[in-house]
Image (cartoon, helix red, strand yellow):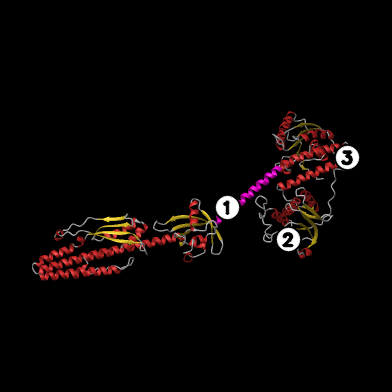
């Protein structure tokens, strides 16, 4: 009976022990459940293996496996079963398979499972030894042995296991609490089980701590990026964003989470998250350019990229946003600079073209003037034809002046201050204007007959008036209208009290009186929103290609550099521009002797080599030389002239050459002649040249530098003076002969 009771008791303890081992295994698996689920969620085999290593520290497990919801093995570990001896080898207990589902964090959706193979027989080795000892002792005292077995099993095994299981269930993942190992169980399986469990808890705690530190480092990295990073869900609502994105949007994370990303875009072409994804896919290489609206209402140019999609189990996606406002501004500035460069190159090309036209036109004028002067010399004083010829010469001089004015607008000149009559300047500008504006626009002049002098650069004053006239004509376009120019004088007090000109006395150069030039038109006037900006450089309201925005800015700069001021306003009928300049109280300049007076060129004698490629002038020069009494030899280009000079280097008293010629220019010809005869007198004539001017002529030690058309009197006097200097063996001294405009 005692043996039966002891046997039953032993079997009962055996069953309880097996159940306790199974419960302990389940509890150990439950402790690893969150870490295993995290490994499956992240598809991280390394983290999964670390979790399994913690389980394999327990002797009960021979095989552990983590699988995803599709049955794919993420990680697995196993070992051989322990060999049993004695009574344990006689009773074979088959390993038991256990499985624990791994749910999605904070969700009932399953990610996978944790599967183990439990070697119950390995956990019963100590129980078998005690059972063998009890069986042997039972033969001596069955009752005592039964009590001892009951005490050992119940109080030394079952209760401590239950206690360990209860305490283990109270320990939360990540907690620093550990199982306490009783002293009496320090060396037995319970102590081993407690230590193994504590080791596993330490491993889990360390991995969770490293995971949190890694997550914090990732967040710090994202917050220190200059690009905005925004995570949105499948519907396009913001889930998370970094500091750069907060700065771009003007909202903190807690106030922007839950708002649609598209709601922050100021792009009419993107009204939904689906359109944003489609546009991002099309521009995936270059990036989608759009605009982000800040909380304060400002728009920032941005480049949007869809950088990363989360795992298939989530619809979240990650977007990067880069602020490209500075790049946009730089590109805009670059385009403006390129446009300015193209305009500068265009103006340079126009200047080059105008220079070529001026050269040829001045040659034609030189022929007209020369032949006219020859014809005039053959007529007697008082004849009507002689007066007609004088008018032709005067018209030729006016044409030469016109060419000079055109060259002023096509190339830069140094500022030259002198006393100028603004009435003459206005008449010349109006003469040019009448030739360019439609006949539907009339011009009204309200100017005094007496001269109004200022100290300034005549060329710049031409630019001021021409820009104001052109601006008025542009305002009228092809519509009928009238442009009015009014000139008068005003003192400082009257000027400061004028209601139409907001010009302060302090802004003007000091003077007793001022010249006021007012240009008005019948156009639509100046819009109030831009009237304060019309003098800004490159500001224009004209369409692309029709205006540069530098005309009025140039006028403003020139007027202020002359100590004056300019003011723009609107009248009842159009726009009004008032220019105020310090008036100069100067006497009328002495009248210049006109060509109609009896002037005869100086005669002389000698042999002259003339190099001229223009057919008209080449035919004119022989008659001019004959009328002046000189022998001459003609050459039609620089190369031919140099060949003639080399054959007879001592035959010529003077060389007269043009500057711009085929094959060899005048300055190159002079250098070659001076290598043969350094003291050879030379006169250089040119219609226009970019490389030859008075300073360059002085460097080449040219005796005279004349600009076409050259009056016969000037040419004759220059020839006689140069020959006189040469024959008297004087040192060659350069003189720059300036041709007065008659």
- x%, y% of residue 218? 42, 60
Q: Position of residue 255 (x, y in %)?
A: 48, 66
Seen at 24% across and 70% down, the residue is 163
Residue pointed to by mark 2:
570
Mark 1 sits on what residue?
331
User: Residue 697 vs residue 5: left or right?
Assistant: right
Q: Tell me which corner region of the image, top left, top right, bottom left or bottom right, holds residue 133.
A: bottom left
Give the crowd class for mark 3: few <14, some 14-19, many >=20 residues within 10 Å.
Answer: many
112 w.r.t. 691: above or below: below
Q: Earlier in the sequence, mark 2 or mark 3?
A: 3
**Label placed on residue 386:** 3
Image marks 2 and 1: residues in contact by CB distance under 8 Å: no
Q: Where, by quadrant of the figure, is residue 222 drawn?
A: bottom left
Residue lying at the far right in this picture: please name it: 382
- The main secondary structure of the magenta stretch is helix
Q: Nearer the viewer, mark 3 or mark 1?
A: 1
């Amino acid at each position: 009976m005692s043996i039966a009771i002891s046997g039953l008791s032993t079997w009962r303890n055996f069953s309880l022990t097996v159940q306790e081992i199974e419960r302990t295994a389940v509890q150990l698996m439950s402790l690893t459940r969150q870490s295993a689920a995290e490994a499956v969620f992240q598809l991280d085999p390394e983290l999964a293996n670390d979790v399994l290593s913690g389980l394999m520290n327990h002797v009960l497990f021979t095989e552990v496996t983590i699988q995803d919801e599709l049955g794919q093995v993420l990680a697995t570990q196993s070992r051989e079963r322990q060999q049993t001896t004695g009574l344990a080898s006689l009773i074979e207990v088959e390993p038991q398979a256990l499985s624990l589902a791994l749910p999605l964090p904070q969700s009932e959706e399953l990610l996978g499972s944790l599967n183990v193979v439990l070697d119950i027989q390995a956990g019963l080795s100590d129980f078998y030894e005690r059972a063998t000892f009890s069986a042997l002792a039972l033969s001596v005292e069955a009752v005592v042995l039964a009590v001892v077995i009951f005490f050992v099993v119940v109080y030394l095994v079952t209760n401590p296991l239950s206690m360990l299981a209860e305490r283990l269930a109270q320990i939360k993942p990540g907690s620093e609490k550990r199982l306490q190992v009783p002293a009496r169980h320090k060396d037995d399986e319970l102590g081993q089980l407690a230590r193994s469990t504590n080791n596993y808890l330490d491993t889990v705690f360390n991995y969770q701590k490293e995971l949190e530190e890694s997550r914090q480092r990732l967040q710090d990295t994202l917050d220190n990026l200059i690009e905005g990073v925004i995570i949105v869900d499948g519907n396009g609502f913001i889930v998370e964003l970094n500091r750069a994105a907060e700065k771009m949007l003007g909202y903190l994370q807690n106030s922007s989470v839950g708002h649609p990303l598209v709601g922050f875009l100021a792009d009419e072409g993107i009204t939904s998250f689906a359109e944003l994804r489609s546009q991002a896919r099309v521009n995936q290489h270059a990036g989608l350019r759009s605009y982000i609206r800040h909380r304060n209402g400002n728009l920032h140019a941005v480049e949007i990229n869809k950088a990363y999609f989360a795992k298939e189990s989530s619809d979240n996606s990650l977007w990067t946003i880069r602020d490209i406002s500075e790049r946009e501004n730089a590109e805009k500035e670059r385009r403006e600079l390129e446009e300015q460069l193209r305009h500068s190159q265009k103006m340079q090309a126009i200047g080059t073209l105008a220079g070529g036209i001026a050269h040829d036109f001045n040659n034609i004028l030189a022929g007209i003037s020369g032949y006219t002067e020859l014809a005039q010399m053959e007529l007697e004083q008082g004849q009507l034809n002689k007066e007609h010829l004088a008018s032709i010469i005067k018209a030729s001089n006016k044409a030469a002046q016109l060419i000079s004015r055109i060259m002023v607008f096509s190339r830069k000149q140094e500022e030259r201050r002198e006393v100028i009559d603004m009435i003459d300047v206005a008449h010349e500008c109006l003469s040019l204007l009448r030739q360019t504006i439609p006949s539907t626009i009339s011009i009204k002049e309200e100017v005094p007959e007496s001269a109004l002098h200022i100290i300034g650069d005549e060329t710049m004053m031409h630019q001021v008036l021409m820009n104001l006239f052109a601006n008025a004509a542009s305002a009228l376009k092809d519509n009928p209208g009238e442009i009015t120019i009014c000139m008068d004088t005003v003192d400082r007090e009257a000027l400061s009290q004028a209601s139409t000109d907001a010009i302060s006395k302090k802004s003007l150069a000091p003077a007793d009186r001022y010249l006021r030039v007012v240009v008005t038109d019948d156009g639509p006037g100046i819009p109030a929103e831009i009237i304060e900006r019309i003098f800004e450089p490159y500001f224009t309201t004209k369409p692309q290609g029709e205006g540069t925005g530098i005309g009025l800015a140039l006028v403003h700069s020139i007027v202020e550099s002359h100590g004056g001021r300019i003011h723009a306003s609107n009248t009842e009928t159009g726009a009004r521009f008032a220019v105020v300049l310090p008036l100069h109280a100067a006497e009328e300049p002495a009248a210049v002797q006109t060509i109609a007076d009896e002037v005869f060129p100086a005669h002389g004698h000698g042999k002259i080599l003339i190099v001229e490629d223009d057919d008209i002038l080449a035919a004119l020069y022989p008659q001019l030389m004959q009328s002046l009494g000189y022998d001459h030899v003609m050459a039609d280009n620089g190369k031919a002239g140099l060949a003639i000079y080399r054959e007879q280097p001592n035959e010529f008293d003077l060389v007269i050459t043009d500057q711009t010629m085929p094959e060899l220019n005048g300055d190159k010809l002079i250098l070659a002649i001076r290598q043969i005869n350094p003291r050879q007198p030379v006169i250089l004539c040119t219609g226009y040249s970019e490389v030859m001017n008075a300073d360059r002529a002085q460097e080449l030690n040219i005796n005279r530098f004349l600009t076409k058309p050259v009056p016969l009197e000037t040419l004759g006097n220059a020839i006689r003076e140069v020959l006189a200097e040469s024959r008297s063996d004087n040192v060659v001294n350069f003189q720059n002969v300036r041709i007065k405009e008659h």
